[in-house]
Amino acid sequence: MKYLLFEDFTHFDLLPFCFTRPVYEIRSGIFTFAVRWEKSLGEAAGTIAHSYLGRKYNRLPEGTFTAINGKFIPDETMLRLIQEIPENVYFENPEGEVLAFRGQQTTMFENGLISKERLEKAGYKAQRVEVTSTALRKMSDIFRLNAPLIQFDFQLITKERVSQPVLDTYSIIYGKDNIFIEEGVKIRAAILNAENGLIYLGKGVEVQEGAIIHGNHALGEYATANMGAKLRGDSSFGPHVKVGGEVSNSVIMGYSNKGHDGYLGNSVLGYWCNLGADTNTSNLKNTYENVKLWNYESRRFENTGLQFCGLMMGDHSKCGINTMFNTGTVVGVSANIFGDGFPRNFIPDFSWGGASGFTTYMLKKAFLTAEVVMQRRSVPFDEVEKEILSHVFELTKIHRSWENTQPLNL
């Protein structure tokens, strides 16, 4: 059977991460949601994305396919439902969210997003199903769901497979049956404690001397845990991430660096980010009140209902040494932050500056930086990437309130 992953309009609550990728390409746990679905289905799935992302992400199957809302976790209930969808019907859950439907390319609508209204206009009828499958709906869900998703993914990737052994006699291992190690992993004089959670080390991972890793934990292909790193549980680091210092319940999606001392807690970093040495994030208010996060759609801070919530940083953003982020800070795509003091709790996309104020990080300069950074990892910064960042730059002008009075030409 052919499958297609789509996203609905709730992806706006996942900005800035969904400025540069569809919701199903977000990493939480060991995998992205797209990879998790493909492994659960046992075959590749097509994808459709928001219009300006289509050139990078659209892979449309031919003929009839089963379309699946990619923000959901492929649990047993979801996998059963997608086998039962009748023609000209879409399944919705008690919250009114579209779960899945069976269709053809003619059901693909303007800008690549799916809604009940668009499906009904195309002749589909709703069928409510009493399911409560978990889904990714808000930024904070990325780290909040990370521990159960590590456990879910661990079963998917290790089933009927045998872990590589830890051969280093200077490393200390607790709960070895809860640890899975892929080929090419290098561990030197480290401590791995999986007594209370799972640990997954992907192909080519390096765990350097003195690093301490507690489960639940996942390091993707060729990620590095730097010397002396204190990596607490419920954290995931994607491919080619370099991580050091102290980290707790956080996700770094891929190709980003938090290589130095400093604390990162209940936080999410996208791709191609870099935190300068001794950068620290607050994840708990002194008053112990719930944390608020900036919402791009409502253009205001909204209550997360969480007591612990740190930094949300979009792709290509960087900060200088000794940067201090307040509890519940949202940093947009391609921001460059530096200087003394605490910057504001919402730093718009393509910002340049810090606590003393911001100007605009112009596209030409941002492109030069992105090209250098990506070339260091042998990844091309091509015209498709430029088009996406250019579109985000235009979309987010409304948030850069200073542009009318403080233009910056770089």
Image (tube, grey):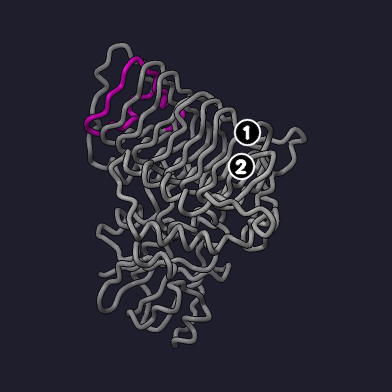
Rendered position, 298 above or below 140? below
Rendered position, 220 above or below 172? below
- Pinpoint residue 292: horizontal percent, then vertical percent: 69, 48
Q: Secondary structure at mark 2?
A: strand
List the single residue furthest toward the right.
Answer: 287
Rendered position, 351 above or below 204? below
Query: Does 283 sit left or right of 39 as displayed?
Result: right
The residue pinned by badge 1 equals 339
- Pinpoint residue 289: horizontal percent, then vertical percent: 75, 41
Image disc number at residue 26: none
- Pinpoint residue 220: horizontal percent, then vertical percent: 34, 38
In the rendered image, which quarter contains the N terminus? bottom left
Asked whether the viewer can see residue 74, the reply is no
Rendered position, 288 above or below 63? above
Instruction: Tell me, yes or no, whether the highlighted magenta stretch contains residue 154.
Output: no
Query: Does 226 sit left or right of 400 as displayed?
Result: left
- Pinpoint residue 303: horizontal percent, then vertical percent: 70, 51
What residue appears at the point 51 percent right and 51 percent down from the top-left corner? 333
Quarter where residue 284 is shown: top right
Mark 1 and mark 2 lie on one chain; the one further toward the N terminus is: 1
Magenta stretch bounds: 175-197
> Label 2 is placed on what type of residue?
Gly
- Closer to the camera in the image, 333 or 286: 333
- Closer to the camera in the image, 166 or 315: 315
- Closer to the camera in the image, 325 or 349: 349
